[in-house]
Image: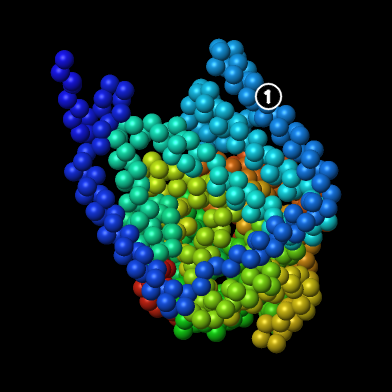
Amino acid sequence: MAQPDKTAGSPDQSGFKMPDPALLGRSMAEIAERSQRIVGEWLKRQEAGEKPADQSHIGSAFLEMTTRLMANPAHLVQAQIGFWQDYMTLWQNTARRMMGVDSPPVIDSPNDRRFKDGAWKESEVFDFIKQSYLLSARFVQDVVTHVDGLDPKTAQKVDFYSRQFIDAMSPSNFLLTNPEVLRKTAETGGENLLKGLSNLLGDLERGKGQLRIKMTDMDAFQVGENIGVSDGKVVYQNDLMQLIQYTPTTAKALKRPLVIAPPWINKFYILDLRPRNSFVRWAVSQGHTVFVISWVNPDEHLAEKNFEDYMHLGFLAALDAIEAATGEKEVNAIGYCLGGTLLASTLAFMAAKDDTRIKTATFFVTMMDFREAGELGVFIDEEQLNALEEKMNKRGYLEGSEMATTFNMLRANDLIWSFVVNNYLMGNDPFPFDLLYWNADSTRMPAKMHSFYLRNMYQENLLAVPGGISLSGVPIDLGQVKTPAYFLSTREDHIAPWKSTYRGTQLLGGDNRFVLAASGHIAGVVNPPEGGKYNHWVNKDLPADPETWFAGATELAGSWWPDWHRWVTSFSKAQVTARQPGDGKLPALENAPGSYVKVRLT
């Protein structure tokens, strides 16, 4: 009897598509050529003296944990007994399911997006794999988080890197244990894996031998064309920033201009992504004359720029420029994250100089007290800072991609492993997403400034100490700041934890208001009223304990933006005829968003 012809590229009766030999051959030849080139570039860098990252601090932390654990093994034994009991129950329940008897899960994670595919629940095999992983993850976390005698810093490291390991070992990250990947492999004859390997090589090529995961379609966006499109002009620039004045959309404008300083870790257009979620566009529509600082993407020529240079060439230069552009000395100011830390420092500097030009200050997700800086503290110790400074001093700056990798590790499942599965295992192209484009558009940090910032604030927490740091010879005392302040923090912030940002209300000496928004460091801030997506909490009282504040807070629906607008205009509602960029003493230099923001990393 003749056998049916199985044409390459056609599915057989089982639904498995046979691979196309011609496509396979071309793909493997291309993969071999690209791989050879990547390895060659890597070898050249090794010859040039490039050193791999020093991970000894991780090993020493786990060694200390193991030593403490072995000194009192009772908890380990108890955890092991509980783990094996749960595992035996899982075996028994799985056997019952195979015999058609419904059995409840031993452990479940219903909201875990890694296991959203139906097969993780419907298939006895994949359900067993999932539950085995969840039990093992719980066992590891239970052991490492209950070790007596570890200092808090070491315990934080052990916990963080244990979770990195647990996340990496999820069965969803591997071909043979991910039902969705197996299904697509069968349907495409393995073409998804070839495409995924090509995607992997492309990411290695972009990173010049280091993996830089492509999170979005980088060709789908262009700053100034479909993101960062609010109309305005650059009216001033210096070595560190361009100052953008936005075109009014109302006949009248508030007399006091509004100046916004974003962090220089990222680019300013997070506040002007698209018209529908642009804080800049919304603030203009409310009658604010909006100025935004667009920081330069520094190179080795700015290696010696320090934190105080960002103060003088940032906020203070902007105040002088705004006065020239509008004739107004008094302004409202906003600082976002590191830009907020700079704003607080600048206000203390101005207080010492009796300079009262900033009449209200708003702090978006800003830390001033760094004693509990969240998981970023894992990367801040003497050993790691020395290694980082050695690397920065050779180049004159911290590479933006290295900073981005650190932030991505804080949410590894969302910002690393989900893309590994989608791009490399499923062989999909990343989806166009404006927020992820902005996230990938990282910037460098000048070596001297970044070292000052990490050591004096993250490591020593000196900004919270009166006179702990000095800028241009002036001791900085946040308690001398009497400017009314609005604090906006977010409940799920993994970069600036809200309980830490709340402490700023206890440091500044003026009339303060604290508002807590839902979601995280970005989404909770960029939350326009029309979307109605995230709620926020308010409480006019400011007790010392943030939990006490939250217990007495009132939850309100929707965006915090209108609350902020009511607050800032309560200090002055005076209006003037709306000002056009370039009509004052400062001529328009170029159209917004300017040229500084368009400098990308290679």
Answer left or right for 114 relative to 193. Answer: right
Answer left or right for 26 relative to 347. Answer: left
Q: Quadrant of residue 533?
A: top right
Callout 1 environment at 10 Å: few (<14), some (14 to 19), or many (20+)?
Answer: some
Task: Please say which color scheme the image uses.
Answer: rainbow
Q: Nearer the viewer, residue 546 or 402?
A: 402
The percent coordinates of residue 422 (x first, y second) are 42, 43
Mark 1 lies on a secondary structure that is: helix
> Residue at point 74% right, 54% down?
66
Q: Quadrant of residue 244?
A: bottom left
Answer left or right for 453 relative to 183. Answer: right
Q: Nearer the viewer, residue 581 or 545?
A: 545
> Residue at point 57% right, 78% down?
390
Q: Which residue is mark 1?
A: 89
> Residue at point 69% right, 69% down?
381
The single residue placed furthest to the front in the displayed view is 1
The single residue placed furthest to the top in the displayed view is 100
> Residue at point 72% right, 29% down?
85
How many numbered marks, from 0 up? 1
Quarter of the figure with the N terminus: top left
The single residue placed furthest to the bottom in the displayed view is 473
* Any part of residue 512 in sight: no
The percent coordinates of residue 170 (x first, y second) are 55, 41
Whether 28 is drawn above or below 300: the answer is above
Q: Nearer the viewer, residue 374 or 510?
A: 374
Quarter of the figure with the C terminus: bottom left
User: Label 1 sits on what residue type?
Assistant: Thr
Whether 109 is drawn above or below 471: the answer is above
Q: Nearer the viewer, residue 76 or 488?
A: 76
Answer left or right for 425 relative to 252. Answer: left
Whether 223 is drawn above or below 321: the answer is above
